[in-house]
Amino acid sequence: MKYIGIPKNFLWGASTSAFQVEGGYKENGKGLSIADIRSFRNSETRLDTKETVDGYHLWKKDISLMKDLGMKSYRFSISWPRVFPNGDEEKPNKEGLQYYHNLINELKRNNIEPIVTMYHFDQPYGLIKKYGGWVSRESINDFVKYAKCLFDEFGNDIKYWLTINEQAVLVVANDMLGISQDLPIKEKFQKAFQANYNMWLAQAIVYKICRERFPDTKIGPAISYITTLPASKKSIDMMEAKNFEDFYSFSQMDVAIHGEIPKQFTNELDKLGIDIKTELNDKEILQKGRANILGVNWYCTTIVEAVKDSKQSDFIFKRMKRVQDKNLLYTEWGWNFDPVGFRYGLRQVMDHYGNIPIIVSECGWSEKEKLENGKVHDLQRIKYLNDHIEQMGLAMNDGVNVISFNPWSFIDILSAGDGMEKRYGLVFVDRNNFEKKQLKRYKKDSFFFYKNVIKDNN
């Protein structure tokens, strides 16, 4: 099936992240990450990061499946503590680097373009114990050191870098930053938004370094884009939808692309009484270090309505609430099926940032699934992929500069909050939360559908 608007040189791919796919959590010198620590707290109730689907050992088999699928790109992340086990070492872990050299070389041998995320929820736990992780400004230097190491090792092989994955998610789910959940809510958010600011500065420095050393390379953040719609035709619902979308998603893009923090964002922090610690040259750092690409993680639309009797002096989360549209299909985890919203969201990005290249770094449908006679008939995922690709093509025909589509996920992986129950993959892994089995890989029906999509649109 061919789609309007998608060129022949398009990068058709799929995505994963290190802590969710690799396992091998302490092999060959790897240190612990906050993602590891967080998962271990629930080891009795679901799968943790110790093994996941063992991509660390089965990567050649998985790349063979990628080649069979016809993938032109693979968006994955490098495990920070596999490179710097505690985060503060002077020299990197050579065995950790070699793993990624092997992975990247094999991808390139199979004509699959690596799209590499530097940090996907897995800061070394050693930095959190040492100074609180991203909450401390010290984290900026450690991230920059890590990024420089990646440029030294892989800079000539990587055309596309994504610095930090879903920074806004980390602020809201701030236990992923190592922030104690026993703290009062204001103190938790004070720390989380300070971490958010420090991440902005760290990325700006890294953007600048990359663009100076590798002028033809594209680098930017992977943004969690929550396209937000009003529950009614009322202007008050429309205003709160816009406020939430701007605060949560577009503020992250604005800082990366324009090098400025939006006034609306700082206004909301003022309502919480949050005071961000800054230094004199911070504005210059943000201005001089800007992204030249956007990674966009898009799954569904979010529908909101204004809370009655709320005041504009209230923080944004108190002024709106999420609601479900009874006319839309929802996953068991509350995410809807709204493909036209994808086209609308991409058009919104173009309206804000013009011709900026966009990598769709995540987009997918989750279900609980069973293997039956060696097959998985994931018809709803096929419909999700078809309809979203169609709408993406229409957005591209409208002028949106999407260069790559990487649905989440290539293979069934550990869900950050739901173990192995919540499956997104094109490839089924025969294991559950507590039974490893043989970790055998099976191509789902969606694998064959997507394979034909790639073949027909090249």
Image (cartoon, helix red, strand yellow):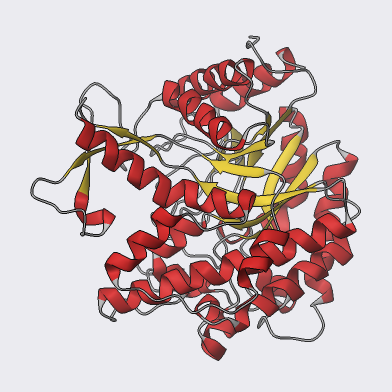
Q: Residue at x 35, y 71 (%)?
A: 189
Tell me if residue 15 comes above or below residue 324 in the rendering: below
Examine the image and state in which quarter residue 407 appears. Answer: top right
Q: Residue at x 49, y 38 (%)?
A: 298
Tell me if residue 165 comes above or below residue 389 in the rendering: below
Task: Point out residue 57 in the picture as x, y percentages from the top left corner.
Answer: 72, 58
In-front residue for pair 378/90: 90
Tell me if residue 22 comes above or below residue 345 in the rendering: below
Examine the image and state in which quarter residue 207 appears. Answer: bottom right
Apparent side of residue 165 relative to residue 212 in the rendered image (left or right):
left
Task: Point out residue 74 in the picture as x, y percentages from the top left corner.
Answer: 71, 42
- The answer to whether residue 375 shows anywhere in this view is no
The quarter of the image holding the C terminus is: top right
The quarter of the image holding the N terminus is: top right
Q: Residue at x 67, y 22 (%)?
A: 451
Apparent side of residue 61 relative to residue 406 in the rendered image (left or right):
right
**How many numbered discs, if any?**
0
Task: Point out residue 424 in the picture as x, y percentages from the top left corner.
Answer: 49, 39
Q: Residue at x 87, y 43 (%)?
A: 108
Apparent side of residue 77 relative to residue 383 in the rendered image (left or right):
right
Examine the image and state in which quarter residue 403 appears. Answer: top right
- The answer to whether residue 48 shows anywhere in this view is yes
Apparent side of residue 115 relative to residue 387 in the rendered image (left or right):
right
Farthest residue to the bottom: give it. Answer: 130
In-front residue for pair 54/453: 453
Tell me if residue 57 comes above or below residue 258 in the rendering: below
Task: Point out residue 249 in the picture as x, y percentages from the top left corner.
Answer: 46, 47
